[in-house]
Every structure is written in C-alpha cells, then in structure tokens.
Amino acid sequence: MFSFSQYITESTKNLHMEHLEDAVFNEGSKGVEEAIEFVESIVEMLSGSASKKVNVTVKWDGAPAVFAGINPENGKFFVGSKGVFNKTPKVNYTNADIKKNHKGGLVPKLQYALKHLKGLNIKGILQGDLMYTPGDIKSKTIGGESYITFTPNTITYAVPTDSDLAKEILASKIGIVFHTKYTGRNMSDMKASFNPNVKQLKKSRSVWFQDADFRDTSGSSTFTQKEVEAVKKQLDKVRSLLKQSSSFADRLKNQSNIIDMIKVYGNTKVREGKTKLSSDEFITFVNDKMQTAIDKLKTDAAKKRKEAVRDKLISDLTSQKTNLSKVFDLHDALTRTKIMVVRKLEKIKSIGTFIKKEDGYEVTAPEGFVAVDRLQNKALKLVDRLEFSKANFTVAKDWVKG
C-alpha cells in the first residue's frame, strides 16, 4: 500500500470533531457502520421512537473556545483556550497569566471570561464557545425588523430587540454556550464527556449561558413516514457501497498522511462550492502539491530524490484509482444522507442566524449539529459543508486569534 511517510514526515494532528462522512477515512468500514447507526438513531429520535442512545446538540458558531473551571491539581479557578491541554499547559489564574500566555484579540476575551465565569461555581472543567463580550452586541435592522446581533465567528446571531431573551443578553457582560465537560485527577489525563448539566451552575446576571441541546417545541423537525423511508433507502445505498469498498477503506485509514491530503483536497472542493471527490482530481492535486514542494528544494540531488518518491506515489495512487473512486462514492453517499438529516434539524431555530454580505445580511442555517452517542461517548459533526464551511473559509471575522 502506498504511503506519504517518505515524503511528508509530520502528519497534522486532528484536534477537532470530525464530520460524519469522514468516518470512512478516519475509521474505515467500522467508522461507516457507526455513522449509519448514528443516522438511524437520529431518525428514530426525530420520528418519536427514540431509544435515547443518541442525543443531538446544536453546533454554535462561537469563538474562541473557552475552558473554565477548577484545576484538580491545586483547586484554583482558571480559564484558558485550547492550550490548557498542551504539554506545557497555558492555564490562566490571573490577568497577568493571560497577558503572558496569549496575544491579540484573545487576551481581552479571556480576561472577561476570568472575571465573570468564576461566579458560576463550575464543578470540574467546562468547555464552551464564547458568543460575545462587551462591545460585540450591535443593533441592526434586518428585513425591516429590529434585532440585537453578535457575530463571534462566521454566523451573525440575531435576537428580536423587544424579546425577553434580548433583555437578558443586554443585561449580561459575556455570553457562552457550554458543550463539553472534563473530569480527571490532573490536567494531563482529563476525559471529555458531552452534554454537561448547566442547570447545576449558579445563575449570574453578568453571564448569559446555556447548553447546546437541540430543542424542538413545535414538532416541525419530526420525520414523516415518507421521510423515514427516504433516509432508509439512502442508507441502503451506503451499505451497498460499503460492501464494494470496505477492504480498501480499512487499508486506507492507516495511511494517515494520505488521509490528511484527502481532507485538504476536500476543503479545496468546498471552497469551490462542491463536495463530490474525484480520484483523477485528487491524483492531480497530490502531484501538483508535491511538485510545489520539490521546486522549493535547493539542490538537484534533493529534487531527484523527492521526484522519485513523488513518481512512485503517483504510480501507486493511479493503480488504486478504481478503489479510490469507490471510497469517494461512499463518502458522497454518506454526505447526502447527512444532508437529509441536517435539513430536518434546521427547521428549528431559537435565534435567527445570518451571514453578513457586502449589501446586507442573508438568512442562513445554524453552523450545524452534533450527534452524541450516550453509551460510547462519541460524537460526529452534522454540518452542511457547502453552506457553512465555505462561508467559514471566506467570510471576514470580527475577532482576531492570539
């Protein structure tokens, strides 16, 4: 089986939740089978016959990610970003720590979090998406209606100005949606669990907070029998394609550097407004990317060595083109299945969501949803990549990472 290991020595670590359809790349046939189970459980939940095995949460488009709670090693309250779990953790107990460990727009965000989240009496450690801090809330007129808005990342959230929710948000200093809890005896061996019970937190006027649970009080996201049958038919197609490609998918999942390149290629397709992957296009993409790296080498000897590696890899990929195409077809079938579920979930929105355009605001769906297996504590993203991911790559952001 082909490998990039001779050419690219450092594989990109995956530090974020994966898309449901990428299960075929990440875990091979087992991952696809689990993805099928996720979809079946969600459909059961949304058709009134849920086994409670899977829960669905809304994926809020907040930024930055904030960790807050008690360090079990010393009993002190802290805040931080994703660096809290580094080998050398960036854990902040004071404003001075924040200035030392971070820079840019992240500094004031974390300082507000340190000041206001402590009053919630968090037990353990919670992770959430920051929605706003002072200065982020604006008054806008959209479609002739008056809203208060905040744009933490790509999506603009809009709440009717005269609503009770708007009054609650305006009275607060910081807004955050908690989605993950961490427990453990020390920072290095923390274990994550989804759907933290935020009802146990102490209420604070200065903090607007909630969990990410999906709530449908109107019943408009319930699957009809006809819709259930349509999803089942699509899942039958997924199973058929899995039979044709399971052996190759199980070999491919172990080639982490190739999987990384497939995902990079996939993201370029999303930027173009497409999700269907092509084996011919992928081989060309790999060849071009490797040639770019070769052109940067300084000596002819080094170039010849890498050209030999490139030629061997392209030859191997070409020989596996039929198998690659089958796996890509399976990926596409999973994507189509996911979109059927996402479209149903999108019918419920507690807060208006918009994308900011040059000439105003365009209505959009939420960033997506997360399916959580309560028994195995596993989670997969359900995101319409053509809508949200493309916007996430291209829309200007209101805050700067640091």
Image (cartoon, rainbow, N blue to C red):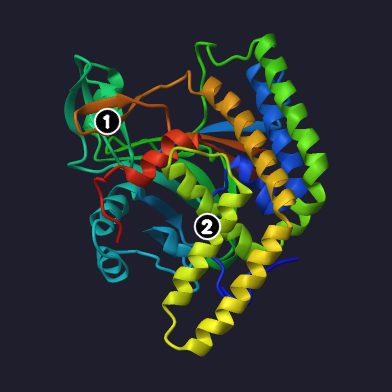
Q: Which residue lies under the disc numbered 1?
A: 169
- Gap in angstroms between the C-alphas marked 1 and 2: 47 Å
Q: Which mark is residue 285?
A: 2
Q: Which mark is residue 276?
A: none
Quadrant in the picture for residue 20: top right
Circle nearer the viewer, 1 or 2: 2
> In the figure, is residue 175 to the left or right of 32?
left
Identify residue type, mark 1: Ile
Q: Position of residue 37 (x, y in %)?
A: 74, 34
Any part of residue 211 in sight: no
Identify residue type, mark 2: Phe
> In the figure, is residue 224 to the left or right of 236?
left
Residue at 63 percent across and 70 percent down: it is: 4
Q: Position of residue 147 (x, y in %)?
A: 22, 22
Question: SS for tag 1?
Answer: helix
Any part of residue 193 in sight: yes
Q: In this view, does 310 lie above or below 321?
A: below
> In the figure, is residue 362 to the left or right of 385?
left
Neighbours of disc 1 within 10 Å: few (<14), some (14-19), many (20+): many
In the image, 181 versus 218, the foreground residue is 218
